[in-house]
Amino acid sequence: MIILKFIIAIILTLAVCELLFFDITGLGRRKALREFPAAAQQFGFVRQKSRASKPIGDYAGEYRGYHFVVEPDRNATIQLQMKPLEGLKEMMTRKGDSNFESGDASFDGLFKTRRASTEMAGRIQRSPEFLQYAARFAGQWRWKANYIQIHSDAIYCSLKYGNGRYIPASVLAQIVPEMATLADLLQAGANNQ
């Protein structure tokens, strides 16, 4: 009976660790090694040459008019590069200082750091589509992401899988189009006079 309880405790511990993205068994990383290249290729992303040896490797490419850089081995980061938005400094899910309120409580609660010029802040406040989508995006990914950052020329998302050592192919397939939509709505709202 004691052995059975011990085995159940080990199984539950491993299950909790997998749910918390620790990937102690390495199953998630091995699956990512197999599936990630094909998922990246679906978006037209190409593996980049690197001086450092990386099991999965970095990928980059264009998708929906944005340049993406995906670094699964290094902090499991996805970066979307976009046309710079003058006046936007940063918005991120980490705690920091803010110089404006968006008027959307959900957005303000998730994006704790918000810094922009007065003019840009006004444009963001008048963009309910962006605010609602960004709040939904951050709310959906907040438990799976270390942080989400929006800068004047890029959007970053660092994921927790395997303590930042891989990105599951299924996550890449979901988050890349969502990041592109987030950038579309931000660009539309920020360029709205």
Image: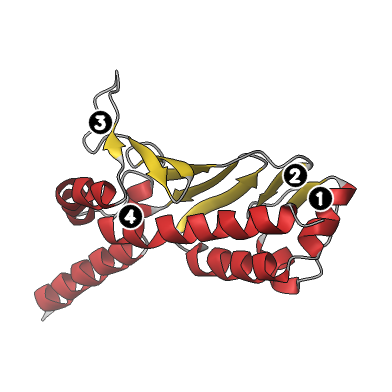
- Of pointers 3 and 2, the one earlier in the residue sequence: 3
Q: Residues within 10 Å of mark 4 (few under 14, many from 20)?
A: some
**From the viewer's perspective, is 135 left or right of 4?**
right
Binning the other alpha carbons within 10 Å of mark 1 as few (below 14), some (14 to 19) or many (20 upward) gives many
Mark nearer the N terminus (1 vs 3): 3
Colour style of the rendered protein structure: secondary structure
- Frontmost of labels 1 and 4 is 1
Q: Which residue is mark 1?
A: 120
Mark 4 vs mark 3, CA separation in Å: 19 Å
Q: Are marks 1 and 3 in contact (CB under 8 Å)?
A: no
Estimate the x, y position of residue 15 in percent, counting from the top left. Answer: 26, 68
Disc 1 to disc 3, C-alpha distance: 40 Å
Name which residue type carries label 4: Phe
Residue 157 placed where, x, y %? 50, 49
Disc 2: which residue: 88
Q: Amino acid at mark 2?
A: Leu
The quarter of the rendered structure image containing the N terminus is bottom left
In three-dimensional space, the C-alpha distance between marks 4 and 2, rounded to whole angstroms, equals 35 Å
Which class describes the residues within 10 Å of circle 2: few (<14), some (14-19), or many (20+)? many
Mark 3 surroundings within 10 Å by alpha-carbon count, few (fewer than 14), some (14 through 19), many (20 or more): few
Mark nearest the camera among 4 and 3 is 3
Residue 134 is tagged as: none
| Residue at (73% x, 53% y) in the render | 190
The picture quadrant where one finds residue 4 is bottom left
Residue occupying the point 53% across, 45% down: 156
Rendered location of residue 162, percent (x, y): 32, 50
Q: Which mark is residue 54?
A: 3
